[in-house]
Image (cartoon, grey):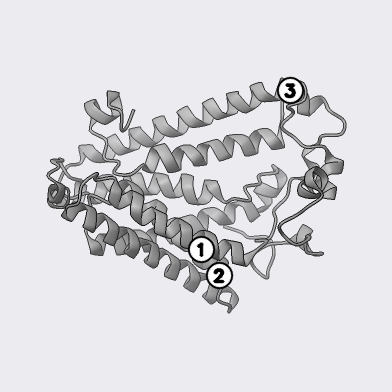
Amino acid sequence: MVWGGGVLGEDLGVLDFAGGTPVHVCSGATASAVSIYLSYPIFRSRKSAVRTPTHIRIHRPGNSFFQLLAMIIIWGSWLAFDAGTVLALNFQAVMALCVTNLCASAGALTWSCMTYFETGRWSLDSTFMGAIAGLVMITPSAGFIDMPTAFFFGIFGAVVCRQALRIKFTKFAHHWRWVDNGDTFATHCVGGIAATICTGLFAQKKVAAYGGVEIDGGVFFDGNVRQLWVQIVEVLVGFTWSFAGSYAIIALIDCIPGLEVLAVDKHINEGLDMNETEEFLSGMEYPDEVDYTPTPKGIISL
């Protein structure tokens, strides 16, 4: 619908350079659908006495070295696929690489500083999350914005995604068993929505022209107010499509005997890695993990 033509790509003229909606909004919608179903299953998992959502809870970051390794791999790969989206060696590809790196850097720095001002400590986890937020923010706009705008995108993305991340530590989320240990909703879904809408606001004709691409531009630089509404439609369609489809798929899987989506409580308590393979990659749980929150004051009020 976005890259393959059709209503969004050709008729409406959506601006989505490297996958803000197909990659980020849709993955966040899927994570939300799966999280909701796991907390409130409706088929075989619900009827099982040994499979309950009581074990679903928030976990600490388990392995900082793996997180650092993942950040290096993801960041480097993101530079390649954003720049490679042009499918040519031209100035637009170089510009896409530069704005991607700058946006990720701005996001990592912003999130780290916010954590430091709140807790008094620098955090590798915060650097990682900020970089991801920046990379998500730049994805749909990498071929359409300049360097100063990319720096602003990184800061804005880190602030928005960090605030969205705080939702899962609230009393509301605890009451409704909202768990997203991969932070997919906060970073990919919320960040992808913000990025797609911001693309409609800040896209520039002159930057797209570096690769010989003609666009109508966005609201602020080219006065194209229509583009904002087009981007909002893209976000709504992408989220609805992915959420509904993913929820239906996981519900249908849960109908099949032997494929119940909730694990057996006993196996969860033993550790799934240990139960299935008698091996584990990460260390055992922290003794205080049941009460874990990333801030010293516990429950967060938005």
Instruction: Identify which amino acid the numbered label 3 is placed on.
Output: Phe
| Residue 124, disc | 2
Estimate how packed mark 1 is, as few (under 14), some (14 to 19) or many (20 or more) residues with alpha carbons within 10 Å.
Answer: many
Task: State yes or no: discs 2 and 1 in contact (Cβ < 8 Å).
Answer: yes
**Under tag 3, what secondary structure?**
loop
Q: Nearer the viewer, residue 178 or 13?
A: 13
Query: What whole-number distance in Å separates the C-alpha atoms at marks 2 and 1?
Result: 6 Å
Q: Which residue is located at x 52 percent, y 53 percent?
A: 164
Q: Which residue is mark 3?
A: 43
Disc on the earlier residue, 3 or 2: 3
Amino acid at circle 2: Leu
Residue 159 in sight: no
Question: Which structural element holds mark 1?
Answer: helix
Q: Which residue is mark 1?
A: 128
Q: Is residue 1 above or below residue 125?
A: above
Label 2 SS: helix
- Quarter of the image for the N terminus: give it: top left
Q: Nearer the viewer, mark 1 or mark 3?
A: 1
Residue 152, compared with residue 237, is above or below; it is below
